[in-house]
Each structure stands twice: as C-alpha cells, then as structure tokens.
Amino acid sequence: MPERTSYDAVIVGGGHNGLVAAAYLARAGRSVLVLERLDHTGGAAVSTRAFTGIDARLSRYSYLVSLLPQAIVRDLGLRFAVRKRTVSSYTPAVRGGRPTGLLVGGGEARTRESFAELTGSEREFAAWQRFYGTTRRLAERVFPTLTEPLPTRAALRAAVDDDATWHALFERPLGELVEETFTDDLVRGVVLTDALIGTFAAAHDPSLRQNRCFLYHVIGGGTGDWDVPLGGMGALTDALAEAARGAGAEIVTDCAVTGIATDGRNAEVTCARGTIGARRVLVNASPRELAHLLGETPPPPAEGAQLKVNMLLTRLPRLRDTRVDPREAFSGTFHVAEGYGQLERSYRQAASGELPAAPPSEIYCHSLTDPSILGVDLVRQGYQTLTLFGLHAPARLFAADNDATRERLLAATLAELDTHLAEPLADCLAHDADGRPCIEAKSPLDLDAELGLPGGNIFHRELAFPYADPEDGGGGAPARWGVATGHPNVLLCGAGAVRGGGVSGIPGHNAAMAVLEEG
C-alpha cells in the first residue's frame, strides 16, 4: 500500500523512463509514488528466465543500448555498464553461386578487405567511411540536445551546421541519399536497416518516418554505437529501481491505474489501492493509454511492425561462408534477407497484406559479449543466446489469426536464416526441462497484450524529429521539454514523448526537469 494519500508526483508505469523520472524527482526532495500494473518494474526493459528449468536470463523485449546518456547513469549513481561489440555487423550473401558476406568490424583493414572482396573495388568502403563520418558528426551535434529543452527547427539546423546533411536526412526521403552514396545492393540494404527498426516504411516514403527512425539509430551516445547491457537489460531497470527507492520514492507493483482526473492544478489517480492525490502526474505509458485514463478520444492507432524471437542454443550454427567464424558473425548484427531490393520487396508484400516471402531479420548473440546472463553450467557447456528482430511484420498481418500467423512467419524467418547456414538452426536449439525447444516469438499483437504497446509499436507512436512542433499540446515547461499533454499538470514521461523511443531514459529525465523547472 502507498504510505500517503497525496504526493508531489505520481508516476503511472514502472518502466525505465518512469523510474528515471522517479529517481530525479525524489533526489530533488519531492514525494514520489510509482504505480506499476505488473508484479515487477521494468516494462519492456527486463531480463527473464524464458525457458522452463533453464538458467538463462534473456533480455526478453528490448535488448541493446545506444540512446541512454551517460549523464543519467552518473547523475543517478547507477551500478550499470555496457560493453562494446568488436563486430558491428555481418551480412551473408551469395555471389556468383558462392557463399560470401560483408563483415564490418575487426579493424579497418579487415573491413576494407571484406568490402573489396564483396564488391570488387575500394569504392563502396570509401563511401561507407564518408557516410558514417557524416552521421557521427551529426550525432555529436544532435545527441547532447536530447536532454536539453527542445530546440526549434531552426536552432537544431544551426547546431547541425551542415546544410547538405540537414537536407538529406531531415527533408528528403532517405532512399535518395542511400542510392546516391552507394551502388552495391547489399551495402545499401545494410545502411537502410537502421531506418526500419520497428518502423513500417519504404526507403522513399514521403512521410519521412524512415528518416526519423534512422536518425535515432545513428545518434546514440554521440557515436551511434549499439552496446550490450552487462547482466541483460533487466540490470538497468533493477539499478534504476534501486536508485529511485534509495532516493525516497515509493514503488507499488500489482497496482493498475484505472483513471486520472485533473483540473490543471491538482490531480487524482485512481488505482487498485484507491484514489491518490497528486500535484503532478507523469505517465510512463503510451498516448493511447493516457487518453484512456483521462476518458478522452484516443490518438490515431499506432502500429508496430516486427517479430521478436528469443532463442537458446547448445552451440552456434556453422556458416556456409567458411571464411567467417560464427562467433565473429553473430557477435555483431547478423543481417538476413536485408539487401536493398529484398527490403523493398518485403515491404510491398506486407503492404499488400501478405507475409514477406523472404522475411528480413537481424540477429545477435548477447552471450558472446556478456556470458553473465547464463548460468555457470551453461557457459561451461558452450550454450549461447540468439536474439532475432524481424522487419516488415506489421500488426495488420496478424489480426485475423495471431497465433497461426506468428508461427508461419517464424518458420519462414528461420528457413531464410537456414539458407546461409551449413546446418539447420533447429539442430542447435537447446531444450527446456519439459523437452521443448528453447525458442519464443512475439508478434506486435503479443507486445500490445503483454506490455500495452499500442499495436505493438515499440516507440508508442511514430517517432518525431527532435525539435519543437508548434502543434504539440500544453504550454510552459512541459512544452519546452517535449513532455506536454493537454493538461498542465499531466506529463508524458514514456516513449510517446517528443524524443522518446528506445531504451534511453530521456523522456523520464525531461519530464523530471519540466517538473523541477516549474517548482
């Protein structure tokens, strides 16, 4: 039970962003209550023993870290760290009837050689270096603004200080830049994948939703690196819960919030434990859920577009491309059916209501970089995890029969992976204590049902460019920080806030800053 009947701030939802907000506000002396529907905190950033009788704590939903500012880790004194991956990516291919692939990692010389072997010249590697040199400079300029008050569009453009880059990434469909820069289909596809994570779009989509997704995937940490959370993603949210409690915040689980009432100055939050007063309410849930709690008209439906698969293997599978060690190939992002043309065909098929014939996906092995998520016996026996994220799988495809469609797509996705393996992946799967293969898959509809992600959208709604939108509701400090709603004392602190999405803590930080700025 909550200790009080009224608080300075009540936070609805105990995901990582809500915990960040709670920790900052409690450290500033505010009375804070976090109410979480589930029996544990963490939301989508959790570690779970997914397979019966198996000592493996998998990052069940979100699984890599890029957007979390080190300033948040330092400010809150978190006992949490990430580890760099030595390989960025490996993409298998068949050229001239021979299995080959593109390895990005292992040093500049190794990467240059891989580009030359795949494409037959130095041109693509030189273009790759220029391209990612540009995105890194962009990251250095944009990432620091994410934990500051929202810049105007003009101010962000001035900070970028590169009109050509601004025009290419903020004003034109990303496909134009990719096609102007690269000539090899496989290289183009590897670049485009960062624009399609959880985002259903074509390379030339005029809405630029693919550009916004790409931007968030290349600016993290000011470098664009995607790192492995030591101890799994749950290590972060456990550290955040500890920091919030240590600062004096109360956290109540198994406590679903059913309504919010506000007159703009004071609010009441109705939950399973009764009605609690609050000066401010911070909602670490989607805009759809916020509208439901306020009794308002919900926003346009959001839609996720991914298949998430977790696996435990007794060993990594051998590759048809024998020049690459599986331990190297799977330690980075292993791209499957993600050539540029393949991605476009899959998009068109899914847009027409069909499952992609060659489902695109990307895979990585957490345990190669961080074996601590496995029990000692599993490590000694050589077990490994695999995390697969499938693209172009919009929620609409699962509407008629979620279970059957999920199984069909999973089978097709693994079959596509098998075309690049020297042995079937099924031969490498571990089995749980009941003899079942250690593999689970989550569709967008599963993510909606389990986590409240609207339509399974991992960003809660379409991502926005990280500058002020004059049409955003609210005013004062919440609008300045991108966390405003239609009510002055109700703030969004989850992924649906401006500059939300991904495991970042940024919306939680910004909501807390808005509260503290108003006093």
Image (cartoon, helix red, strand yellow):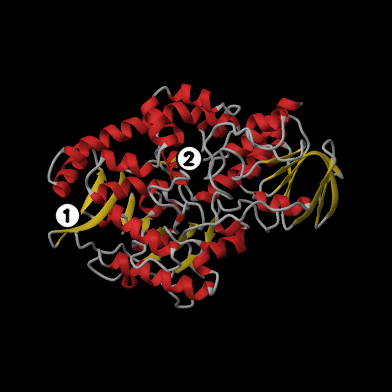
Residue 183 in which image quadrant: top left
Q: Is residue 96 left or right of residue 10?
A: left
Q: Quadrant of residue 428?
A: bottom left
Please indicate whether residue 516 sits to the left or right of residue 76 in the image: right
Task: Find residue 236 and report its horizontal and vertical position in percent.
Answer: 55, 45
Res. 121 image quadrant: top left
Which residue is label 1 attached to? 323
| Element type at mark 2 | loop
Q: Residue at x 84, y 47 (%)?
A: 276
Q: Are marks 2 and 1 in contact (CB under 8 Å)?
A: no
Task: State the residue position of label 2.
Answer: 81
Q: Is residue 437 above or below residue 45?
A: below
- Label total for image: 2
The crowding category of the residue bearing disc 2, from other C-alpha atoms within 10 Å (few below 14, some 14 to 19, many at least 20), is some
> Can residue 35 be seen from the camera position used here?
yes
Q: Can residue 50 be seen in this snapshot?
A: no
Q: Amino acid at mark 1?
A: Arg
Cα–Cα gap, marks 2 and 1: 33 Å
Q: Which of the labelled discs sits on residue 181, or is there none?
A: none
Q: Nearer the viewer, residue 189 or 63?
A: 189
Q: Please tell me which residue lies in front, 179 or 197.
A: 179
Say what amino acid the circle numbered 2 marks: Ala
Image coordinates for residue 358, horizontal then vertical, percent: 33, 65
The residue sitting at 51% across, 32% down in the picture is: 70
Look at the image and tell me in which quarter the C terminus lies. top right
Front residue of 284 and 255: 284
Single out the residue that lies furthest toward the front.
Answer: 206
Q: Position of residue 202 (x, y in %)?
A: 40, 52
* x and y percentages locating residue 367 in the rendered image: 39, 54
Frontmost residue, 314 versus 252:
252
